[in-house]
């Protein structure tokens, strides 16, 4: 993935997250959003997690590290700040490998 690809993907994820929060706000207590984050910029993802939690979301989804991908594997210490933020915010994260990027 190029830097431009990552930037565009992140912009799309953020647009989805804003739409999702607005959608859930239309039925408070009845809708719960699963927002999206990326593994390419942990600081931005942690900031997005805080924003989403503030908006009432309680779970996140992200594409896991695809085989041959350009980010460390999920068990790498690199992700500790992300996992710590998940624990602190009580955010559940679902990861899936994107096999198309092999």
Image: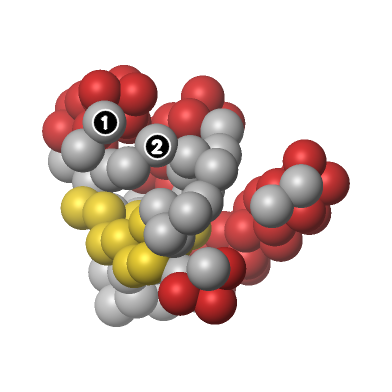
Label 1, residues with CA under 10 Å away: few <14, some 14-19, many ≥20? few
Residue drawn at (55%, 43%) of the image: 70
User: Disc 1 marks which residue?
Assistant: 76
Front-lying residue, 69 or 14: 69
Residue 1: mark: none
In 3D space, how far apart are the residues under numbered discs 2 and 1 (Cα atoms)?
Answer: 6 Å
- At numbered mark 2, what does the secondary structure look like: helix, strand or loop? loop
- At numbered mark 1, what does the secondary structure look like: helix, strand or loop? loop
Residue drawn at (83%, 46%) of the image: 4
Label 2, residues with CA under 10 Å away: few <14, some 14-19, many ≥20? some
- Relative horizontal placement of residue 42, taking residue 83 as reference (left or right): right
Vertical order, 87 against 34 (above or below)? above
Callout 2 touching callout 1 (CB < 8 Å) = yes
Task: Kindly indicate the quadrant of the structure image that contains residue 81.
Answer: top left
User: Disc 2 marks which residue?
Assistant: 72
Q: How many marks are shown on the rendered structure? A: 2
Vertical order, 91 against 102 (above or below)? above
Residue 30 x, y percent position in the rendering = 29, 77
Front-lying residue, 16 or 98: 98
């Amino acid at each position: 993935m190029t830097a431009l690809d990552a930037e565009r993907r992140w912009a799309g994820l953020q647009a989805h997250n804003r739409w999702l929060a607005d959608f859930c706000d239309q039925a408070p207590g009845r809708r719960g959003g699963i927002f999206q984050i990326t593994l390419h910029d942990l600081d931005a993802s942690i900031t997005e997690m805080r924003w989403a939690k503030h908006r009432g979301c309680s779970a996140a989804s992200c594409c896991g590290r695809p085989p041959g991908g350009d980010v460390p594997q999920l068990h790498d210490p690199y992700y500790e700040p992300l996992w710590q933020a998940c624990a602190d915010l009580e955010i559940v994260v679902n990861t899936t490998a994107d096999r198309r990027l092999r």
